[in-house]
Image (spheres, grey):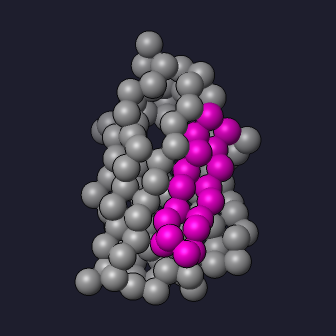
């Protein structure tokens, strides 16, 4: 059974940083693209960042230069380093395992003073 578990969310002040983690289990990790999405309150889920099996990355325009996605194939982990956080980054953040179209349960990020 493939499974994703996100962690690392929390409450942070504007300008602060957080590092989200996503742990994968039960499937083949190294050959799959992995992505982060987010769902702000009252809005639809949207793309944040993706990393290919070779390590190529792509980002939503709204987070370019502030967020960095990375992966550790040996640990079956994907990370999202978020810097210079803004109130509009407040959302439930989800990890996606492209190979199996599997989602985690999400981790809440709240940016507020």
**Please, is residue 72 above or below residue 49 in the view?**
below
Query: x%, y% of residue 59?
Result: 65, 54
Query: x%, y% of residue 108?
Result: 34, 40
**Residue found at the very far top of the displayed protein:** 113
**Count of residue discs:** 0
Query: x%, y% of residue 103?
Result: 34, 67
**Residue found at the very far front of the displayed protein:** 74
Q: Residue at x 46, y 86 (%)?
A: 28
Find out whether residue 76 is within the magenta segment: yes
Q: Is residue 32 left or right of residue 109?
A: right
Q: Please name the predominant secondary structure of the magenta segment in the image.
A: strand
Q: Residue at x 55, y 75 (%)?
A: 74
Q: Which residues are magenta?
A: 66-83
Quadrant of the rendered structure where residue 25 is? bottom left
Q: Nearer the viewer, residue 31 or 89?
A: 31
**Residue 40 visible, this orientation:** no
**Residue 6 visible, this orientation:** yes
Q: Residue at x 73, y 41 (%)?
A: 65
**Please, is residue 44 above or below residue 29 in the view?**
above
Quadrant of the rendered structure where residue 90 is? top left
Quadrant of the rendered structure where residue 24 is? bottom left
Work out which quarter of the rendered image holds the N terminus and state it.
bottom left
Query: x%, y% of residue 47?
Result: 52, 56
Work out which quarter of the rendered image holds the C terminus and state it.
top left
Find out whether residue 62 is within the magenta segment: no
């Amino acid at each position: 059974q493939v499974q994703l578990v996100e962690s690392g969310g929390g409450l942070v002040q504007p300008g602060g940083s957080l590092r989200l983690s996503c742990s994968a289990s039960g499937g083949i990790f190294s050959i799959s693209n992995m992505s982060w999405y987010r769902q702000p309150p009252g809005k639809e889920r949207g793309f944040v960042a993706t990393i290919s099996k070779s390590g190529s990355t792509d980002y939503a325009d709204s987070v370019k230069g502030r967020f960095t996605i990375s992966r550790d194939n040996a640990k079956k982990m994907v990370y999202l380093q978020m810097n210079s956080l803004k109130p509009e980054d407040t959302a439930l953040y989800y990890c996606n395992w492209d190979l199996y179209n599997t989602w985690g349960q999400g981790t809440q990020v709240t940016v507020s003073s």
